Amino acid sequence: MSSTNALSEIDECWNSSSDAPARPVALLRGSARGLEIVVDGRASGDAIAVAVSAKLGEAPTFFRGSDVRIRVDEGPLPLGCLAKLDTIAGQFELRIVEVGALSKDGVPHPNLAAGSAPAPASKTDSDAVEQLAGEQDPAQGSLPLPDEPAPVPVPVAESEPAPSVKAPSVDQLELALRAMEPEIEVVETPADEPETRIVIGPIRSGVIFEHRGHVIVFGDVNPGAEIRAEGNIVVLGRLRGTAHAGIGRDAGFILALRLEPQQLRICRLVARASEGDTPGSQPEIAHVTSGTIVVERYLGRLPGSLAASI
Amino acid sequence: MGRAIVITSGKGGVGKTTVTANLGTALAQLGHSAVLVDADIGLRNLDVVMGLENRIVYHLVDAIRGKCSVQKALIKDRRMENLWMLPASQTDDKDSVSPEEMKSLIWELKHTHDFVLIDCPAGIEQGFKNAIAGADEAIVVATPEVSSIRDADRVVGLLAASDIPVRLIVNRISQALVKRGDMLSQSDVIEILALELLGTIPLDDQIVATTNKGIPAVLEGKSLAAKELLRIAKRISGLEVEDRVASGFFARIGRALGLSATPA
Protein backbone atom coordinates (compact mmCIF):
# COMPACT_ATOMS: atom_id res chain seq x y z
CA MET A 1 0.00 0.00 0.00
CA SER A 2 1.23 3.38 -0.86
CA SER A 3 0.88 4.80 2.62
CA THR A 4 3.14 2.17 4.05
CA ASN A 5 5.77 2.94 1.46
CA ALA A 6 5.40 6.60 2.20
CA LEU A 7 5.85 5.98 5.86
CA SER A 8 9.02 4.04 5.26
CA GLU A 9 10.20 6.89 3.09
CA ILE A 10 9.74 9.26 5.97
CA ASP A 11 11.57 6.87 8.25
CA GLU A 12 14.42 6.77 5.77
CA CYS A 13 14.51 10.52 5.65
CA TRP A 14 14.73 10.61 9.34
CA ASN A 15 17.41 7.99 9.58
CA SER A 16 19.61 8.69 6.62
CA SER A 17 20.51 12.34 6.61
CA SER A 18 23.10 13.50 9.04
CA ASP A 19 23.80 17.18 9.26
CA ALA A 20 20.43 18.37 8.21
CA PRO A 21 19.03 21.62 9.56
CA ALA A 22 16.24 21.49 12.09
CA ARG A 23 12.87 20.63 10.73
CA PRO A 24 10.66 23.69 10.61
CA VAL A 25 8.04 23.68 13.28
CA ALA A 26 5.61 25.63 11.16
CA LEU A 27 5.25 26.00 7.42
CA LEU A 28 2.88 28.14 5.42
CA ARG A 29 1.67 26.87 2.12
CA GLY A 30 -1.13 27.22 -0.36
CA SER A 31 -3.26 24.34 -1.42
CA ALA A 32 -6.30 23.77 -3.55
CA ARG A 33 -8.35 24.61 -0.47
CA GLY A 34 -6.58 27.77 0.48
CA LEU A 35 -3.98 28.78 3.06
CA GLU A 36 -2.58 26.00 5.25
CA ILE A 37 -0.24 26.09 8.18
CA VAL A 38 1.61 22.81 8.61
CA VAL A 39 2.88 22.40 12.14
CA ASP A 40 5.01 19.74 13.68
CA GLY A 41 2.95 18.14 16.38
CA ARG A 42 6.01 16.85 18.14
CA ALA A 43 7.17 20.34 19.07
CA SER A 44 5.93 22.03 22.19
CA GLY A 45 2.90 24.27 22.18
CA ASP A 46 5.06 27.32 22.78
CA ALA A 47 7.44 26.41 19.99
CA ILE A 48 4.58 25.96 17.59
CA ALA A 49 3.02 29.24 18.58
CA VAL A 50 6.27 31.10 18.20
CA ALA A 51 6.98 29.51 14.84
CA VAL A 52 3.53 30.23 13.45
CA SER A 53 3.69 33.77 14.71
CA ALA A 54 7.06 34.23 13.07
CA LYS A 55 5.88 32.83 9.75
CA LEU A 56 2.81 34.99 9.66
CA GLY A 57 4.86 37.94 10.81
CA GLU A 58 6.92 37.75 7.64
CA ALA A 59 3.97 39.16 5.74
CA PRO A 60 1.60 40.42 8.40
CA THR A 61 -1.05 41.99 6.18
CA PHE A 62 -0.89 39.57 3.30
CA PHE A 63 -3.16 36.94 4.74
CA ARG A 64 -5.55 39.28 6.47
CA GLY A 65 -9.13 38.11 6.16
CA SER A 66 -8.16 34.65 4.97
CA ASP A 67 -9.48 31.37 6.21
CA VAL A 68 -6.67 29.10 7.29
CA ARG A 69 -6.44 25.40 7.94
CA ILE A 70 -4.02 23.90 10.44
CA ARG A 71 -2.42 20.67 9.34
CA VAL A 72 -0.71 18.79 12.11
CA ASP A 73 2.07 16.48 11.20
CA GLU A 74 2.63 13.74 13.74
CA GLY A 75 -0.23 15.15 15.75
CA PRO A 76 -2.20 15.74 17.85
CA LEU A 77 -1.43 19.29 18.77
CA PRO A 78 0.02 19.71 22.21
CA LEU A 79 -2.44 20.65 24.88
CA GLY A 80 -3.16 24.33 24.94
CA CYS A 81 -1.61 24.94 21.56
CA LEU A 82 -4.86 25.52 19.77
CA ALA A 83 -5.79 28.32 22.13
CA LYS A 84 -2.49 29.99 21.42
CA LEU A 85 -2.99 29.60 17.69
CA ASP A 86 -6.43 31.10 17.99
CA THR A 87 -4.96 34.15 19.63
CA ILE A 88 -2.31 34.47 16.99
CA ALA A 89 -4.89 34.07 14.27
CA GLY A 90 -6.86 36.86 15.83
CA GLN A 91 -3.83 39.12 15.82
CA PHE A 92 -3.27 38.55 12.11
CA GLU A 93 -6.98 38.71 11.36
CA LEU A 94 -7.16 35.15 10.16
CA ARG A 95 -9.84 32.61 10.85
CA ILE A 96 -8.95 29.04 11.67
CA VAL A 97 -11.59 26.97 9.99
CA GLU A 98 -10.19 23.51 10.36
CA VAL A 99 -7.59 21.61 12.29
CA GLY A 100 -6.60 18.27 10.92
CA ALA A 101 -3.89 15.73 10.56
CA LEU A 102 -1.44 15.90 7.75
CA SER A 103 -2.88 12.58 6.95
CA LYS A 104 -0.84 9.93 5.29
CA ASP A 105 -3.71 8.15 3.67
CA GLY A 106 -4.87 11.23 1.86
CA VAL A 107 -8.04 11.69 3.87
CA PRO A 108 -8.26 14.78 6.07
CA HIS A 109 -9.26 14.08 9.64
CA PRO A 110 -10.72 17.21 11.12
CA ASN A 111 -10.92 18.15 14.76
CA LEU A 112 -7.59 16.69 15.63
CA ALA A 113 -6.62 19.10 18.37
CA ALA A 114 -5.30 18.82 21.87
CA GLY A 115 -6.76 16.01 23.83
CA SER A 116 -8.41 14.13 21.03
CA ALA A 117 -7.58 10.61 20.09
CA PRO A 118 -5.24 10.22 17.16
CA ALA A 119 -6.49 9.16 13.78
CA PRO A 120 -6.97 5.43 13.67
CA ALA A 121 -4.96 3.01 11.57
CA SER A 122 -2.72 5.56 10.03
CA LYS A 123 0.26 5.41 12.29
CA THR A 124 2.54 2.70 13.53
CA ASP A 125 2.10 1.62 17.10
CA SER A 126 5.29 3.18 18.26
CA ASP A 127 4.36 6.55 16.87
CA ALA A 128 0.92 6.49 18.43
CA VAL A 129 2.39 5.52 21.75
CA GLU A 130 4.90 8.33 21.59
CA GLN A 131 2.26 10.97 21.00
CA LEU A 132 0.01 9.91 23.78
CA ALA A 133 2.87 9.61 26.19
CA GLY A 134 3.77 13.18 25.39
CA GLU A 135 2.43 16.32 26.93
CA GLN A 136 -0.55 15.53 29.07
CA ASP A 137 -0.03 18.69 31.00
CA PRO A 138 -3.28 19.90 32.43
CA ALA A 139 -1.48 22.83 33.99
CA GLN A 140 -1.08 24.42 30.59
CA GLY A 141 -4.75 25.09 30.23
CA SER A 142 -6.41 23.96 27.07
CA LEU A 143 -9.21 24.84 24.80
CA PRO A 144 -11.21 21.70 25.39
CA LEU A 145 -13.28 20.65 22.45
CA PRO A 146 -16.46 19.53 24.14
CA ASP A 147 -17.03 16.43 22.09
CA GLU A 148 -13.58 14.98 22.33
CA PRO A 149 -13.11 12.09 24.72
CA ALA A 150 -10.30 12.33 27.28
CA PRO A 151 -7.18 10.65 25.98
CA VAL A 152 -6.39 7.24 27.29
CA PRO A 153 -2.78 7.01 28.37
CA VAL A 154 -1.04 4.00 26.97
CA PRO A 155 2.13 2.77 28.56
CA VAL A 156 5.26 3.26 26.57
CA ALA A 157 6.60 0.03 25.20
CA GLU A 158 9.97 0.00 26.88
CA SER A 159 11.63 -2.19 24.37
CA GLU A 160 11.31 0.46 21.68
CA PRO A 161 14.00 3.06 21.90
CA ALA A 162 13.09 6.46 20.57
CA PRO A 163 14.29 6.72 17.00
CA SER A 164 17.37 8.83 16.58
CA VAL A 165 16.06 12.19 15.58
CA LYS A 166 18.12 13.14 12.63
CA ALA A 167 15.85 15.60 11.03
CA PRO A 168 15.66 15.44 7.24
CA SER A 169 16.22 18.57 5.25
CA VAL A 170 13.22 20.71 4.45
CA ASP A 171 13.35 19.60 0.84
CA GLN A 172 13.37 15.95 1.70
CA LEU A 173 10.48 16.46 4.02
CA GLU A 174 8.55 18.40 1.44
CA LEU A 175 9.15 15.69 -1.11
CA ALA A 176 8.03 13.02 1.30
CA LEU A 177 4.98 15.04 2.22
CA ARG A 178 4.12 15.48 -1.41
CA ALA A 179 4.48 11.78 -1.98
CA MET A 180 1.90 11.18 0.71
CA GLU A 181 -0.43 13.96 -0.26
CA PRO A 182 -1.02 13.68 -3.94
CA GLU A 183 -4.20 15.69 -3.85
CA ILE A 184 -2.78 18.73 -2.16
CA GLU A 185 -0.71 20.66 -4.62
CA VAL A 186 1.13 23.82 -3.96
CA VAL A 187 -0.54 26.35 -6.18
CA GLU A 188 1.72 28.75 -7.98
CA THR A 189 -0.40 31.83 -7.89
CA PRO A 190 -1.01 34.18 -9.47
CA ALA A 191 0.91 33.53 -12.68
CA ASP A 192 -1.40 30.84 -14.00
CA GLU A 193 -4.66 32.39 -12.88
CA PRO A 194 -6.93 32.72 -15.88
CA GLU A 195 -7.47 36.23 -17.07
CA THR A 196 -10.65 38.18 -17.08
CA ARG A 197 -12.14 38.17 -20.54
CA ILE A 198 -13.82 41.23 -21.96
CA VAL A 199 -16.53 40.62 -24.55
CA ILE A 200 -18.20 43.17 -26.76
CA GLY A 201 -21.89 42.37 -27.07
CA PRO A 202 -24.58 41.90 -28.02
CA ILE A 203 -24.26 38.21 -27.47
CA ARG A 204 -26.78 36.75 -29.88
CA SER A 205 -29.19 33.91 -29.33
CA GLY A 206 -27.59 30.51 -29.75
CA VAL A 207 -24.11 31.65 -28.75
CA ILE A 208 -22.45 29.95 -25.78
CA PHE A 209 -19.49 31.84 -24.38
CA GLU A 210 -17.28 29.89 -21.97
CA HIS A 211 -14.28 31.11 -20.05
CA ARG A 212 -12.17 29.85 -17.19
CA GLY A 213 -11.88 33.19 -15.44
CA HIS A 214 -14.13 36.19 -14.99
CA VAL A 215 -16.19 37.60 -17.84
CA ILE A 216 -17.20 41.19 -18.50
CA VAL A 217 -19.71 41.83 -21.28
CA PHE A 218 -20.08 45.31 -22.73
CA GLY A 219 -23.56 45.02 -24.20
CA ASP A 220 -26.58 42.79 -23.97
CA VAL A 221 -26.82 39.06 -23.59
CA ASN A 222 -29.86 38.14 -25.67
CA PRO A 223 -32.34 35.43 -24.80
CA GLY A 224 -31.05 32.08 -25.98
CA ALA A 225 -27.43 33.07 -25.38
CA GLU A 226 -25.36 31.59 -22.56
CA ILE A 227 -22.34 32.81 -20.63
CA ARG A 228 -20.46 30.18 -18.68
CA ALA A 229 -17.59 31.17 -16.44
CA GLU A 230 -15.57 29.62 -13.67
CA GLY A 231 -15.24 33.10 -12.28
CA ASN A 232 -17.78 35.86 -11.96
CA ILE A 233 -19.90 37.48 -14.64
CA VAL A 234 -20.53 41.17 -15.12
CA VAL A 235 -22.91 42.28 -17.87
CA LEU A 236 -22.77 46.00 -18.62
CA GLY A 237 -26.05 45.83 -20.44
CA ARG A 238 -29.13 43.68 -20.24
CA LEU A 239 -28.72 40.09 -19.17
CA ARG A 240 -31.63 38.38 -20.84
CA GLY A 241 -30.10 35.02 -21.59
CA THR A 242 -28.60 32.48 -19.20
CA ALA A 243 -25.52 33.04 -17.08
CA HIS A 244 -23.59 30.44 -15.09
CA ALA A 245 -20.91 31.75 -12.75
CA GLY A 246 -18.61 29.97 -10.35
CA ILE A 247 -18.49 26.72 -12.28
CA GLY A 248 -16.52 24.22 -10.28
CA ARG A 249 -16.05 26.62 -7.38
CA ASP A 250 -17.73 27.48 -4.12
CA ALA A 251 -18.73 31.03 -4.81
CA GLY A 252 -19.51 33.40 -7.60
CA PHE A 253 -21.72 36.30 -8.53
CA ILE A 254 -23.54 37.66 -11.55
CA LEU A 255 -23.96 41.37 -11.91
CA ALA A 256 -25.92 43.17 -14.63
CA LEU A 257 -27.13 46.66 -15.34
CA ARG A 258 -30.50 45.11 -16.08
CA LEU A 259 -30.92 41.63 -14.69
CA GLU A 260 -33.72 39.98 -16.70
CA PRO A 261 -32.30 36.51 -17.21
CA GLN A 262 -33.92 33.37 -18.45
CA GLN A 263 -31.91 31.49 -15.85
CA LEU A 264 -29.20 32.25 -13.35
CA ARG A 265 -26.79 29.58 -12.27
CA ILE A 266 -24.12 30.00 -9.63
CA CYS A 267 -21.92 27.04 -8.77
CA ARG A 268 -24.41 24.22 -8.56
CA LEU A 269 -27.53 26.28 -7.89
CA VAL A 270 -30.11 27.33 -10.43
CA ALA A 271 -32.64 30.11 -10.18
CA ARG A 272 -35.17 31.82 -12.39
CA ALA A 273 -37.43 34.79 -11.92
CA SER A 274 -40.69 33.96 -10.23
CA GLU A 275 -43.90 34.71 -12.03
CA GLY A 276 -44.69 38.04 -10.50
CA ASP A 277 -41.23 39.51 -10.75
CA THR A 278 -40.76 42.59 -12.83
CA PRO A 279 -37.24 43.32 -13.97
CA GLY A 280 -35.64 46.08 -11.99
CA SER A 281 -34.34 49.18 -13.60
CA GLN A 282 -31.28 49.33 -11.37
CA PRO A 283 -28.10 47.33 -11.49
CA GLU A 284 -28.51 44.10 -9.58
CA ILE A 285 -26.20 41.40 -8.36
CA ALA A 286 -27.00 37.74 -7.78
CA HIS A 287 -25.00 35.66 -5.36
CA VAL A 288 -25.38 32.74 -3.00
CA THR A 289 -26.46 33.17 0.60
CA SER A 290 -27.38 30.27 2.84
CA GLY A 291 -27.58 27.85 -0.03
CA THR A 292 -29.85 29.88 -2.29
CA ILE A 293 -29.30 32.43 -4.97
CA VAL A 294 -30.36 35.89 -3.86
CA VAL A 295 -30.63 39.00 -5.98
CA GLU A 296 -30.11 42.43 -4.55
CA ARG A 297 -29.54 45.92 -5.81
CA TYR A 298 -25.95 46.67 -6.55
CA LEU A 299 -25.16 49.89 -4.76
CA GLY A 300 -21.55 50.33 -5.74
CA ARG A 301 -19.98 47.76 -3.41
CA LEU A 302 -19.84 44.02 -3.35
CA PRO A 303 -21.72 42.36 -0.51
CA GLY A 304 -19.29 41.50 2.31
CA SER A 305 -18.37 37.89 1.87
CA LEU A 306 -18.14 38.09 -1.90
CA ALA A 307 -15.05 40.20 -1.98
CA ALA A 308 -13.04 37.41 -0.40
CA SER A 309 -14.27 34.88 -2.88
CA ILE A 310 -12.73 36.57 -5.89
CA MET B 1 -20.83 44.90 -60.51
CA GLY B 2 -24.21 44.45 -58.85
CA ARG B 3 -25.07 43.97 -55.22
CA ALA B 4 -26.21 40.60 -53.92
CA ILE B 5 -28.66 40.93 -51.02
CA VAL B 6 -30.05 37.91 -49.19
CA ILE B 7 -33.44 38.30 -47.53
CA THR B 8 -33.64 36.01 -44.54
CA SER B 9 -35.38 35.66 -41.20
CA GLY B 10 -34.82 32.33 -39.49
CA LYS B 11 -38.48 31.96 -38.74
CA GLY B 12 -40.77 30.85 -41.52
CA GLY B 13 -43.77 32.75 -42.74
CA VAL B 14 -42.73 36.25 -41.71
CA GLY B 15 -42.71 37.69 -45.21
CA LYS B 16 -39.35 36.98 -46.81
CA THR B 17 -40.76 35.93 -50.17
CA THR B 18 -43.27 38.77 -50.27
CA VAL B 19 -40.58 41.29 -49.37
CA THR B 20 -38.22 39.86 -51.98
CA ALA B 21 -40.84 40.02 -54.72
CA ASN B 22 -41.93 43.54 -53.86
CA LEU B 23 -38.48 44.97 -53.29
CA GLY B 24 -37.29 43.53 -56.57
CA THR B 25 -40.27 44.96 -58.40
CA ALA B 26 -39.81 48.34 -56.71
CA LEU B 27 -36.11 48.44 -57.59
CA ALA B 28 -37.04 47.72 -61.19
CA GLN B 29 -39.60 50.52 -61.00
CA LEU B 30 -36.79 52.82 -59.90
CA GLY B 31 -34.88 51.90 -63.03
CA HIS B 32 -32.40 49.33 -61.77
CA SER B 33 -32.05 45.86 -63.26
CA ALA B 34 -32.94 43.27 -60.69
CA VAL B 35 -32.93 39.48 -60.63
CA LEU B 36 -34.75 37.55 -57.92
CA VAL B 37 -33.27 34.16 -56.99
CA ASP B 38 -35.45 31.64 -55.21
CA ALA B 39 -33.08 29.68 -52.95
CA ASP B 40 -35.86 27.68 -51.30
CA ILE B 41 -35.13 24.49 -53.19
CA GLY B 42 -37.90 21.95 -52.83
CA LEU B 43 -40.43 24.45 -51.47
CA ARG B 44 -40.40 27.14 -54.06
CA ASN B 45 -42.79 30.05 -53.59
CA LEU B 46 -41.24 33.07 -55.26
CA ASP B 47 -42.60 32.04 -58.64
CA VAL B 48 -46.14 31.91 -57.25
CA VAL B 49 -45.87 35.30 -55.58
CA MET B 50 -44.48 36.81 -58.77
CA GLY B 51 -47.13 35.16 -60.89
CA LEU B 52 -44.55 33.42 -63.09
CA GLU B 53 -45.14 29.80 -62.17
CA ASN B 54 -46.55 28.77 -65.49
CA ARG B 55 -43.49 29.91 -67.34
CA ILE B 56 -40.86 27.79 -65.62
CA VAL B 57 -38.80 25.66 -67.98
CA TYR B 58 -35.44 25.49 -66.29
CA HIS B 59 -34.54 26.22 -62.73
CA LEU B 60 -31.64 26.95 -60.42
CA VAL B 61 -30.49 23.37 -59.96
CA ASP B 62 -30.51 22.86 -63.73
CA ALA B 63 -28.31 25.90 -64.13
CA ILE B 64 -25.87 24.79 -61.44
CA ARG B 65 -25.63 21.27 -62.83
CA GLY B 66 -24.91 22.69 -66.25
CA LYS B 67 -28.05 21.39 -67.87
CA CYS B 68 -28.61 24.88 -69.18
CA SER B 69 -26.99 28.27 -68.96
CA VAL B 70 -28.00 30.61 -66.20
CA GLN B 71 -29.44 33.07 -68.71
CA LYS B 72 -31.70 30.41 -70.12
CA ALA B 73 -33.12 29.62 -66.72
CA LEU B 74 -34.02 33.25 -66.02
CA ILE B 75 -37.66 34.24 -66.53
CA LYS B 76 -38.28 37.80 -67.61
CA ASP B 77 -41.16 39.56 -65.93
CA ARG B 78 -43.64 40.80 -68.51
CA ARG B 79 -44.83 43.74 -66.46
CA MET B 80 -41.49 45.35 -65.68
CA GLU B 81 -38.70 46.29 -67.94
CA ASN B 82 -35.72 45.26 -65.86
CA LEU B 83 -36.95 42.38 -63.78
CA TRP B 84 -35.96 38.70 -63.93
CA MET B 85 -36.46 35.71 -61.76
CA LEU B 86 -34.53 32.46 -61.29
CA PRO B 87 -36.91 29.84 -59.91
CA ALA B 88 -35.96 27.04 -57.58
CA SER B 89 -36.44 23.37 -58.25
CA GLN B 90 -39.48 21.79 -56.70
CA THR B 91 -38.25 18.23 -56.93
CA ASP B 92 -34.78 18.48 -55.42
CA ASP B 93 -33.93 19.43 -51.89
CA LYS B 94 -31.56 21.80 -50.21
CA ASP B 95 -28.64 19.43 -50.25
CA SER B 96 -28.65 19.40 -54.04
CA VAL B 97 -26.38 22.40 -54.25
CA SER B 98 -23.36 23.51 -52.29
CA PRO B 99 -22.44 26.96 -51.00
CA GLU B 100 -19.59 27.16 -53.50
CA GLU B 101 -21.92 26.46 -56.40
CA MET B 102 -24.33 29.11 -55.20
CA LYS B 103 -21.50 31.55 -54.79
CA SER B 104 -20.39 31.22 -58.38
CA LEU B 105 -23.96 31.40 -59.63
CA ILE B 106 -24.62 34.62 -57.76
CA TRP B 107 -21.32 36.02 -58.84
CA GLU B 108 -22.25 35.43 -62.45
CA LEU B 109 -25.58 37.18 -61.97
CA LYS B 110 -23.91 40.17 -60.35
CA HIS B 111 -22.16 40.86 -63.61
CA THR B 112 -25.37 41.33 -65.53
CA HIS B 113 -27.69 42.94 -63.00
CA ASP B 114 -27.61 45.87 -60.57
CA PHE B 115 -29.33 43.93 -57.81
CA VAL B 116 -29.45 40.19 -57.07
CA LEU B 117 -32.07 39.52 -54.41
CA ILE B 118 -31.83 36.05 -52.88
CA ASP B 119 -34.97 34.68 -51.23
CA CYS B 120 -33.63 32.58 -48.35
CA PRO B 121 -35.52 29.58 -46.98
CA ALA B 122 -36.50 29.39 -43.34
CA GLY B 123 -34.11 27.67 -40.93
CA ILE B 124 -30.38 27.75 -40.40
CA GLU B 125 -29.28 24.55 -42.07
CA GLN B 126 -27.95 23.83 -45.54
CA GLY B 127 -30.59 25.91 -47.29
CA PHE B 128 -29.62 28.96 -45.26
CA LYS B 129 -25.92 28.35 -45.78
CA ASN B 130 -26.44 28.04 -49.53
CA ALA B 131 -28.50 31.21 -49.70
CA ILE B 132 -26.03 33.41 -47.85
CA ALA B 133 -23.04 31.98 -49.68
CA GLY B 134 -22.96 34.54 -52.44
CA ALA B 135 -24.44 37.50 -50.60
CA ASP B 136 -22.76 40.86 -49.96
CA GLU B 137 -25.44 42.13 -47.62
CA ALA B 138 -28.40 40.76 -45.74
CA ILE B 139 -31.84 41.98 -44.80
CA VAL B 140 -33.47 40.28 -41.85
CA VAL B 141 -37.25 40.31 -41.84
CA ALA B 142 -38.85 40.04 -38.42
CA THR B 143 -42.41 40.39 -37.23
CA PRO B 144 -43.02 41.98 -33.83
CA GLU B 145 -43.39 38.63 -32.11
CA VAL B 146 -41.10 37.06 -29.54
CA SER B 147 -40.55 33.89 -31.52
CA SER B 148 -39.70 35.78 -34.67
CA ILE B 149 -37.30 38.07 -32.83
CA ARG B 150 -35.60 35.13 -31.14
CA ASP B 151 -35.02 33.38 -34.44
CA ALA B 152 -33.92 36.59 -36.11
CA ASP B 153 -31.39 37.15 -33.35
CA ARG B 154 -29.93 33.72 -33.98
CA VAL B 155 -29.69 34.39 -37.68
CA VAL B 156 -28.05 37.77 -37.14
CA GLY B 157 -25.43 36.02 -35.06
CA LEU B 158 -24.76 33.55 -37.87
CA LEU B 159 -24.59 36.30 -40.45
CA ALA B 160 -22.20 38.30 -38.31
CA ALA B 161 -20.03 35.20 -38.03
CA SER B 162 -19.91 35.17 -41.85
CA ASP B 163 -19.06 38.87 -41.94
CA ILE B 164 -22.23 39.83 -43.80
CA PRO B 165 -23.63 43.26 -42.87
CA VAL B 166 -27.25 43.08 -41.79
CA ARG B 167 -30.17 45.47 -41.73
CA LEU B 168 -33.67 45.01 -40.44
CA ILE B 169 -37.20 45.21 -41.80
CA VAL B 170 -40.01 44.94 -39.29
CA ASN B 171 -43.00 43.38 -41.01
CA ARG B 172 -46.72 43.18 -40.21
CA ILE B 173 -46.86 45.73 -37.47
CA SER B 174 -50.26 47.04 -36.38
CA GLN B 175 -50.16 50.41 -34.68
CA ALA B 176 -53.57 49.80 -33.18
CA LEU B 177 -52.38 46.61 -31.50
CA VAL B 178 -49.19 48.26 -30.36
CA LYS B 179 -51.13 51.09 -28.76
CA ARG B 180 -53.32 48.61 -26.94
CA GLY B 181 -50.22 46.88 -25.68
CA ASP B 182 -51.11 43.68 -27.47
CA MET B 183 -48.19 43.79 -29.84
CA LEU B 184 -44.52 44.55 -29.48
CA SER B 185 -43.52 47.88 -30.87
CA GLN B 186 -40.86 48.66 -33.41
CA SER B 187 -38.58 49.87 -30.65
CA ASP B 188 -39.03 46.63 -28.74
CA VAL B 189 -37.81 44.74 -31.77
CA ILE B 190 -34.85 47.03 -32.33
CA GLU B 191 -33.97 46.93 -28.66
CA ILE B 192 -33.20 43.24 -28.86
CA LEU B 193 -31.93 42.95 -32.39
CA ALA B 194 -29.82 46.10 -32.32
CA LEU B 195 -29.77 46.51 -36.08
CA GLU B 196 -30.09 49.41 -38.48
CA LEU B 197 -33.75 49.70 -39.44
CA LEU B 198 -34.58 49.83 -43.14
CA GLY B 199 -38.30 50.18 -42.66
CA THR B 200 -41.46 49.08 -40.91
CA ILE B 201 -44.16 47.50 -43.05
CA PRO B 202 -47.66 47.70 -41.63
CA LEU B 203 -50.05 44.81 -41.45
CA ASP B 204 -52.02 45.14 -44.63
CA ASP B 205 -54.86 43.11 -46.10
CA GLN B 206 -53.80 44.17 -49.57
CA ILE B 207 -50.67 42.12 -49.26
CA VAL B 208 -52.66 38.96 -48.66
CA ALA B 209 -54.83 39.64 -51.67
CA THR B 210 -52.07 40.50 -54.08
CA THR B 211 -49.79 37.69 -53.02
CA ASN B 212 -52.36 35.12 -53.88
CA LYS B 213 -52.97 36.70 -57.21
CA GLY B 214 -49.33 36.75 -58.09
CA ILE B 215 -49.21 40.52 -58.39
CA PRO B 216 -46.62 42.29 -56.25
CA ALA B 217 -48.37 45.01 -54.23
CA VAL B 218 -45.97 47.72 -55.32
CA LEU B 219 -47.25 47.42 -58.85
CA GLU B 220 -50.50 48.91 -57.76
CA GLY B 221 -48.69 50.96 -55.14
CA LYS B 222 -51.50 52.55 -53.15
CA SER B 223 -51.62 50.48 -49.99
CA LEU B 224 -49.62 51.52 -46.93
CA ALA B 225 -47.50 48.42 -47.15
CA ALA B 226 -46.73 49.08 -50.81
CA LYS B 227 -45.70 52.63 -50.04
CA GLU B 228 -43.36 51.47 -47.30
CA LEU B 229 -41.86 48.81 -49.55
CA LEU B 230 -41.17 51.40 -52.20
CA ARG B 231 -39.59 53.62 -49.61
CA ILE B 232 -37.36 50.78 -48.48
CA ALA B 233 -36.36 50.09 -52.06
CA LYS B 234 -35.32 53.70 -52.41
CA ARG B 235 -33.21 53.46 -49.30
CA ILE B 236 -31.55 50.31 -50.53
CA SER B 237 -30.73 51.93 -53.82
CA GLY B 238 -29.05 54.76 -51.96
CA LEU B 239 -31.65 57.49 -52.39
CA GLU B 240 -32.38 59.83 -49.56
CA VAL B 241 -35.80 59.12 -48.19
CA GLU B 242 -37.77 61.38 -45.95
CA ASP B 243 -38.76 60.01 -42.62
CA ARG B 244 -42.17 58.50 -42.36
CA VAL B 245 -43.02 60.93 -39.63
CA ALA B 246 -44.75 63.89 -41.24
CA SER B 247 -43.25 67.08 -40.05
CA GLY B 248 -45.80 69.69 -41.01
CA PHE B 249 -47.58 71.86 -38.47
CA PHE B 250 -50.86 69.96 -38.57
CA ALA B 251 -49.06 66.68 -38.36
CA ARG B 252 -47.36 67.83 -35.19
CA ILE B 253 -50.66 68.91 -33.72
CA GLY B 254 -52.05 65.55 -34.69
CA ARG B 255 -49.26 63.79 -32.90
CA ALA B 256 -49.73 65.88 -29.80
CA LEU B 257 -53.38 64.85 -29.77
CA GLY B 258 -52.41 61.23 -30.37
CA LEU B 259 -54.12 61.13 -33.74
CA SER B 260 -51.41 60.19 -36.17
CA ALA B 261 -50.31 56.71 -37.19
CA THR B 262 -46.63 57.21 -36.62
CA PRO B 263 -44.68 54.17 -35.49
CA ALA B 264 -44.32 53.71 -31.74
Image (cartoon, coloured by chain):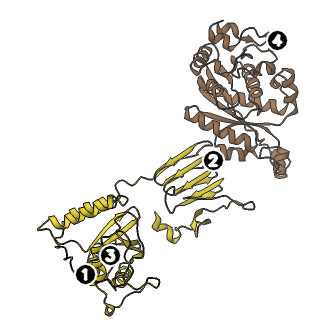
Chain colours: A yellow, B brown
Q: Amino acid at mark 1?
A: Ala
Q: Is residue B55 above or below residue B159?
A: above
Q: Residues within 10 Å of mark 3 (few under 14, many from 20)?
A: many
- Place of residue B211 in the rendered image (x, y in percent of width and height, measured from the top left): 84, 25
Q: Residues within 10 Å of mark 2 (few under 14, many from 20)?
A: many
> What residue is disc 2 on?
A222
Report the chain holding disc 2: A
Residue B212 in the figure: left or right of residue A82: right
> What residue is disc 1 on?
A47
Camera sees residue B260: no
Residue A76 in the figure: left or right of residue A295: left
Q: Say which mark, if any, is on residue A256.
A: none
- C-alpha distance separating marks 4 and 2: 44 Å
Q: Amino acid at mark 3?
A: Gly
User: SS at mark 3?
Assistant: loop
Q: Amino acid at mark 2?
A: Asn
Relative depth, front residue between A16 and B35: A16
Looking at the image, is mark 3 or mark 2 earlier in the sequence? 3
Are labels 3 and 2 assigned to the same chain? yes
User: SS at mark 2?
Assistant: loop
- Place of residue B4 in the rendered image (x, y in percent of width and height, measured from the top left): 62, 23
Mark 4 or 3: in front is 3
User: SS at mark 4?
Assistant: helix
User: SS at mark 1?
Assistant: helix
> What residue is disc 4 on?
B54
Q: Say which mark, if any, is on residue A75.
A: 3
- C-alpha distance separating marks 2 and 1: 60 Å
Looking at the image, is mark 2 or mark 1 earlier in the sequence? 1
Mark 3 or 1: in front is 3
